[in-house]
Image (cartoon, coloured by chain):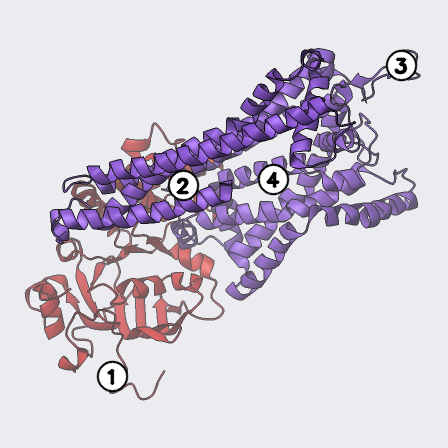
Amino acid sequence: MNLSTLLFTLAILCCFSFLIGKRRALTIAGGKRCNLHSLPGYYGYYASLWCAVPALIILALWTGFESSIITTLVTRDLPTELQNLPSDRLNLVINDIQNLVSGNIVSGEIDPTMRAAADHYQNLKQVSQAALTVLVLTLAILSALLAYRRIHKAQRARNGVERAIMFFLISCSSVAVFTTIGIVLSVLFEAIRFFQAVPISDFLFGLKWSPQMAIREDQVGSSGAFGAIPLFAGTLLISFIAMLVAAPTGLMAAIYLSEYASKKVRSITKPLLEILAGIPTVVYGFFAALVVAPFIRDSGGLIGLDVSSESALAAGLVMGVMIIPFVSSLSDDAINAVPQAMRDGSYGLGATHSETICQVIIPAALPGIVGGLLLAVSRAIGETMIVVMAAGLSANLTANPLQAVTTVTVQMVTLLVGDQEFDSPKTLAAFALGLMLFVTTLALNMVALHVVRKYREQYE
Amino acid sequence: MQPNTQTVSSVTPLMVCTDIEPIAAHDNRKTVGEISVDNPRMSCRNVNVFYGEKQAINRVNLDIGRHEVIAMIGPSGCGKSTFLRCLNRMNDTIDSCRVTGEILLDNQNIYDKTLDVVPLRAQVGMVFQKPNPFPKSIYENVAYGPRIHGLSSSKSDLDIIVESSLHRAGLWNEVKDRLDQPGTGLSGGQQQRLCIARTIAVSPEVILMDEPCSALDPIATAKIEELIDELREEYTIAIVTHSMQQAARISQRTAYFHLGDLIEVGETNQIFTNPQHKLTEDYITGRFG
C-alpha cells in the first residue's frame, strides 16, 4: 500500500471508530444523554483520536527514518572496494543506486554490482512498505479497540478531547518558533564557519569591504577584505534618509487623518495611503533607479553638485515613501487610542484644536508613535530591492548622500546570486552579514515592542 | 423655532428608556416651577438639541443664578448631560450635533456666530464623569490652562496660580511634595480634584460638572461634595448627578429632566419634599429611573 492509500484507509478507520465510539457511549447510557459525563460525540472523537494519533506518530517516524536505514543496510552489503571509497564518492554511488531505483538518469555505466545493489534497495523498500502498512493499520485498530473498551459512563471524554485539541494547537504554534530557531541556527553555524576563516574583529571593525578570495596564490588582487563597517554605514545612511522622509510625513498624515479629516475623507484617504504599502518593492526599486536617481543627478548638475547616478539619496527618498504607510498607520492607531476624555479635558479648558494635538494628544500617543517609528526603521534596514537597484554596489565609507553606497542586504544578494562555492569565506560572509542584520533588527523590534507594551499599560 | 410645537405631545418623544411609562400618560410636559431667577449668570431660552435627526433636548428654558449650585437629575438618556454640554459648547466637538435657541452668559449669547469658543470655555469650565488628568505631571496638569490662555507672565506667577488652584481644590497638602509626578498616578478621588483644580486655574465663572463622583468611592465623593459647597462662594456650579441624595445634599436648586424635556425646576427642598409634577414624584419616590 502506498502512503496516500494508507492515509485514506486510516481516515476511514477514524470515521468508523467515531461512529462506534459514539454508539457505544449511547448504549452504555441506555440512550439517555444525562447518564454520561460528556456529550456522546466526545466519546466518538475520543475513540477516533486513539485510532489516529498513535498510528500517525509511527507513520511519521517510520517515513522519517526509512530512507536512511535502508541506505545503511544497502551500503553494508556493497562490495568492500566501494565501501572504502571516500565519503563524497560513496554518496555519489548511493545516489546512483537511488536513481536506478526511481528510474532516473545515472552518472556512469550501470555495472552488475550497482544493479544488484539497486535490486536490494528495491526489495528492502518493498518490505518496509509492507511492514509499515501492517504496523500502522494494526496499531490503529488495536488502539481504537482499546479506547472503545475503555468507554464507560463516568469517563471524562470531553476533557481528553479538549487536551488533545490543546496539544494540536501547541504544535501548530511551535512550528513558527522552531522555524525561527532553525533559521537562526543555520545562519549561526555558517557564520561561525566564516569567522573561522576571517577573524571576527576584522569583520566587525574593518573599514574595507572587498569580498574576494584568491583561487591561485599569485592572483592579482588576491587579498579579500571583509570589513562590515562600510556596509552598515551605508545601511544606516539610507535608513536615516528614509526616516527623514517617512517620520514627519507619516506622522503629519496620521494627525490629519485621525484629528482633522472628516469621516468621508478618511474613508478614501486611508486606503489610498495604505496602497503605498501594497506596491511591490521591486516597482519602487526601478522607480528609484530610473526616475528619481536621474532626476537627482540632473538637478544636482544644475546647481553644480557632483551626484553619482546611483546615490544614497535616491534610494533613501524612495524607501522613505515606501515606509510612510507604516509610520502613518501605526501612529494613527496610537493617536486614536488616546481616550476621548483627554481631548474633552483639553477642549473643556478652552484649548484649540492644534494646542490639544501638540500638548496633549501627541505626548500621550508618543510611546506608540515611537514604537511605530522603530518598527519602520527595522523595515528600512532590512529593505533590499530598492537599494539593490538604486544605491549602487561600491562599498564607500561616506556620509555624503550624493555618492553611491551599498548596504548589508545588497551585498548579501550579490554574494549569493549565481554559482557559489559554499566553502569559500566569500559566500559565507553573506551568512555573517545576515546574522548581524538579524541581531540588529531583532534588537530594534524588541525595543519597539517594549515601548508599545509600556504604552498600553497607561490607559487600560 | 418650529411654530407648531405648542402641542408638545405631537412631537415624537425620544423613546430612549422603553421601560418607563409612555409619555401620553403625562400629557402636560410644560416645565413646572420657576425657571427664572433674578440677575442670572446663565439664561437658556428655547434650547433644542438634535443629534442628526433625533431630538435630544426639547425647548428647555432655564436660568442659572449666581453663586448657586444647580443640580440636574433624571433617568439615563434624559438629556441632562447633553444640556450641560451645551452650556460651554462642548457639543461642538460632536459632528452630528446641532443646537438651536439661545443661551446667554452674562447677557451674551454664547451661540452667537461671532463668539469665540476659546474664551467661553475658559469662562465656563467643565469637570467630567471620569477623572481625565493629562498624562503629564501634576504641576503641568494645572498649569496647562493658564499657559494656553496666557494668564501668567512669569514662572513665579504660574507657580502662584498652580498653588492656589490646588489649595482651593483641597489637594495642595496631599501633592505639594510631588508636583513633578504624573497626575495619572494619583487615586481616583485625587485625580478628580486635580481636574477641578485644573478647571479653577483658568478662573472660570461657571463650572459644569458631569457626574463628577460617579467613578469615586464614598469617601472621595464626600470630599468632592464638600469642595463643591466651598466653591459656590466664588463660582456658579451646574452639576449633573445620578444620586438624588447628592443633589439634595449639595444643591440649592434642582432641575428634573425627562426624555429631553425639563419637567420641573425649583428649590431643592421643595423638589424633594413636595414635587409638583407626577413624573418628578415618580422618579424621586423611586417608581422608575
**Viewer-proximal residue, A350 or B168?**
A350
Query: Badge 3 is on which residue?
Result: A216
- In terms of secondary structure, where does tag 3 sit? loop
Chain B, hue in figure? red
Dot 4 falls on which chain? A
Q: Amino acid at mark 1?
A: Val
- Image point 29% across, 48% down: which residue? A18
Marks 3 and 2, how far apart in space? 74 Å
Give the crowd class for mark 3: few <14, some 14-19, many >=20 residues within 10 Å. Answer: few
Asked whether, in this view, residue A341 is left or right of residue B253, the answer is: right
Circle 1 chain: B
Of tags 1 and 2, which is closer to the observer?
A: 1
Residue assigned mark 1:
B8
Identify the residue position indicated by label 2 in the image. Answer: B141
The front one of B5 and B15 is B15
Residue bearing the label numbered 4: A376
**Count of marks placed on residues:** 4
Q: Chain of mark 2?
A: B
Viewer-proximal residue among B203 and A373? A373
Q: Is residue A93 left or right of residue B77?
A: right
Judge from the rendering whether residue A404 lies leftward or rightward of residue B99; answer left or right: right
Q: Are marks 4 and 2 on the same chain?
A: no
Q: Chain of mark 3?
A: A
Query: Is B2 located above or below residue B196 in the figure?
Result: below
